[in-house]
Amino acid sequence: MTKDEIPTIAKESLSDLLGEPGGILYSSHETLKPGSVYLLGFNPGGSNGAPLSESVRSMLSYSDNAYLDESWSNGNGEWEPGKSPLQQRIQWLLNEIGLETSDVCASNLIFLQSRAASDISFSLAKRCWPVHKAILEVVEPKLIIAFGNSVDSPYGYLHAMFGGKEECMPSGHGNWRLKGFHCHINDRPVYVAGLPHLSRYSPEGKPQLVRWLADHL
């Protein structure tokens, strides 16, 4: 598998969804290469974005990183590029485990856009999975960091698909937990780490979280 093949796989897998707003990569096309981490959110936020077909078309030339270069807004405010709380938490966490955000391949379990996770069908993850499988075959990560670890989350989807003995540990915030499991994807060993969603959970001041992730790199 090479990165050049991924857009073709995306067109075939998502053929009847290409007119819907959404996106595939949250990172530059230059992250479609071997790397230690794959960052996986649930789905793109907002509404009325560019159609998914545009993301497929530009996949091999897209040079921005959504966590660094985009201006985000929600009901609580609007921020300069890379300055929203979620973006800042992701940058901080990746830096703490020795990585640059711009170097980490990032996507979402479901490629279609919605204002809230509850507004999108979790069943769409199955339609998007062939594209993730192709990306993972190129990136070959040791660690997948998933945002959210409930049943209906990126972590929950991967655990239901691949199984593996689940580890749970305190997150450092109330009764929220960190969850993880070992599995094989594309015949390669991967550790899937499920965090409480970083829109509500701050990793700062939680050294046990940083050590846990670093131990699986």
Image: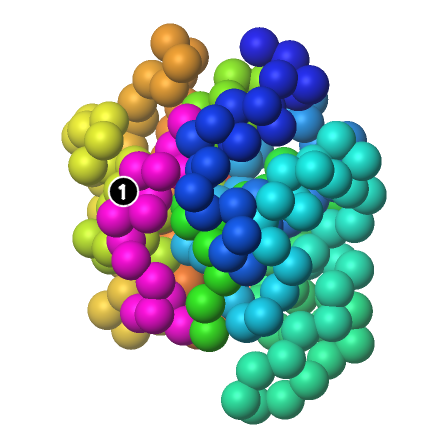
118 magenta-colored? yes
- Report x, y in % for residue 119: 34, 70
Q: Residue 69 occupies which quadrant of the picture?
A: bottom right
181 or 79, which is in the foreground? 79
Q: Is residue 177 magenta?
A: no
Q: What residue is disc 1 on?
A: 157
Query: Could you say which quadrant of the image residue 116 lies in?
Result: bottom left
Name the residue located 31 percent from the left edge and 69 percent from the top edge. 118
Q: Which color scheme is applied?
A: rainbow
Amino acid at circle 1: Tyr
Q: Nearer the viewer, residue 29 or 80?
A: 29
Q: Is residue 1 above or below residue 182?
A: above
Q: Residue at x 57, y 82 (%)?
A: 74
Q: Position of residue 152 (x, y in %)?
A: 24, 55
Secondary structure predominantly adopted by residues drawn in magenta: helix
The N terminus, quarter of image: top right
What is the crowding at mark 1: few (fewer than 14 residues within 10 Å), some, or many (at least 20)? some
Is 153 in front, or is 170? 153
Is residue 88 toward the left or the right of residue 146 in the image? Answer: right
Left or right? Give the position of 63 relative to 51: right
Task: Name the residue located 57 percent from the left edge and 49 percent from the top edge.
Answer: 52
Between residues 20 and 161, which one lies in front from this camera angle? 20
Element at badge 1? helix
Query: Is residue 212 visible in this depiction of the protein?
Result: no
The magenta segment: 116-130
In the displayed structure, 108 sits above or below 84; it is above
Q: Is residue 29 left or right of residue 185?
A: right
Q: Picture quarter containing residue 139?
A: top right
Tell me: residue 67, above or below residue 58: below
Residue 121 shows in this picture: yes
